[in-house]
Image (tube, rainbow, N blue to C red):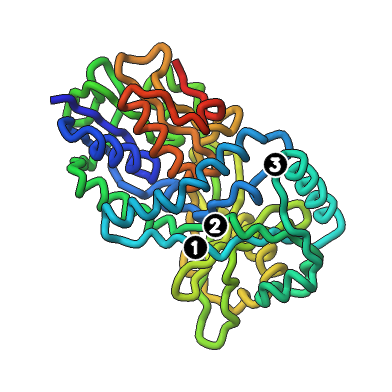
Amino acid sequence: MERIVVVGAGVVGTTAAWVAARDHAAAEVVLVDPASGSGASWVAGGMLAPITEAWPGEREVLELGAASLARWPAFAAEVEQASRRRVGLRTEGTLAVVVDTADREDLDRIVAHLRAWGRDAERLTGREIRRREPALGPAVRAGIAVPDDLAVDNRMLLAALREAARNAGVCERAETVHAVVDGGVELASGTLAADRVVVAAGAWSATLHPALADLVRPVKGEILRLRARAGSLPPPRRTVRAAVSGRAVYAVPRDDDRLVLGATQYEVGFDPDVTVAGVRDLLADAERVLPGIGDYALEESAASFRPGTADNLPVFGPVSGGPDGLVACFGHGRNGILLTALTADVMAALLAGRPVPDDIRDLVEVTT
């Protein structure tokens, strides 16, 4: 019997393991992680927002994200059917707003780039955008409405993917993988033999074999989770992305009057601390856009590490210089949750020895 070992149990790795078990009933699929779902997938906003995430010069990132977003409704339905759990997909859309003249100029440039790339967004004045989302404050000067940019509850998604993987026969092992070696992976308890090893350990993937060392790096991010208290103004119904004095902040609603705030970004290696400055800036910027959150309860602060790559695109496929059977599936950066639906299709093709789907073949770089 073939054994496929998947290293890393965030949304990307768990999706890869589920797809492997779903499509290869005769294979033994083992998902290895010392703390399943505790990394960047746990500390995430859950935005499915390729349009409002778009940056000038990153057209491939936009197109890849849009291709994944188009897959999300079917992907969410399949995960929910396989797990009998909700994934918390939210379809209210996204608003991108600005609070000063300089940020409005940046917004104009982004809209111009989107239109040049064949994408559009509805421009709104501050008054118009506050009519749509009364939680926004008077500091908001302008914005765009993007109804197709969605969101998902990352923690509900993780739980559903784990259950779907278990139902498909995936075996979980709560151990640390020290290295990928010829014929398997090295654990503290010894070598776990494998015919194929899928490395989906996010920012930690680079530590598992010399051939992976330069392909991915950690990019630290911090989030806050808030809860509206009795008598507080309710949180926004839509995801709100804002530019405040050049800093980006997002607010993603959750069930039960909760709100996730992000997104700081630092190139500081594996520094796990939530900083006072990071919390201060997130709260100050978010409160300028959503004044009502000053009365909310601060339930959680957390930091984790996005897996960054040189071109901000994920790495898929066999790795040159690595052992036979080593397959990369990492480097999703700030779009890990968004790209999960597309990752399912890519990994299904790679593990079956098929070309990736036609609509994304030119967007996905498969290593050789």
- In this picture, residue 367 sits left or right of residue 324: right
The answer to whether the residue labelled 1 contacts the one labelled 3, judged by CB atoms less than 8 Å apart, is no
Residue at the spot 53% in from the left edge and 39% down from the top edge: 333
Q: Residues within 10 Å of mark 2 (few under 14, many from 20)?
A: many
For label 1, the SS is strand
Residue 341 at x, y = what percent?
43, 44
The disc label shown at residue 90, or none: 1
Q: Is there CB contact under 8 Å for labels 1 and 2? A: yes
Residue 196, horizontal then vertical, whole percent: 27, 23
Identified by mark 1, the residue type is Arg
Mark 3 residue crowding within 10 angstroms, few (<14) / some (14–19) / many (20+) = some
| Distance of label 3 from label 2 (alpha carbons) | 18 Å
Quarter of the rendering containing residue 284: bottom right
In this view of the protein, can residue 159 be seen by the observer? no
The x and y percentages for residue 243 are 73, 56
Check disc 2 and report the residue beneath it.
Answer: 150
Of badges 3 and 2, nearer the viewer stands 2
Amino acid type assigned to the residue bearing label 3 in the image: Trp
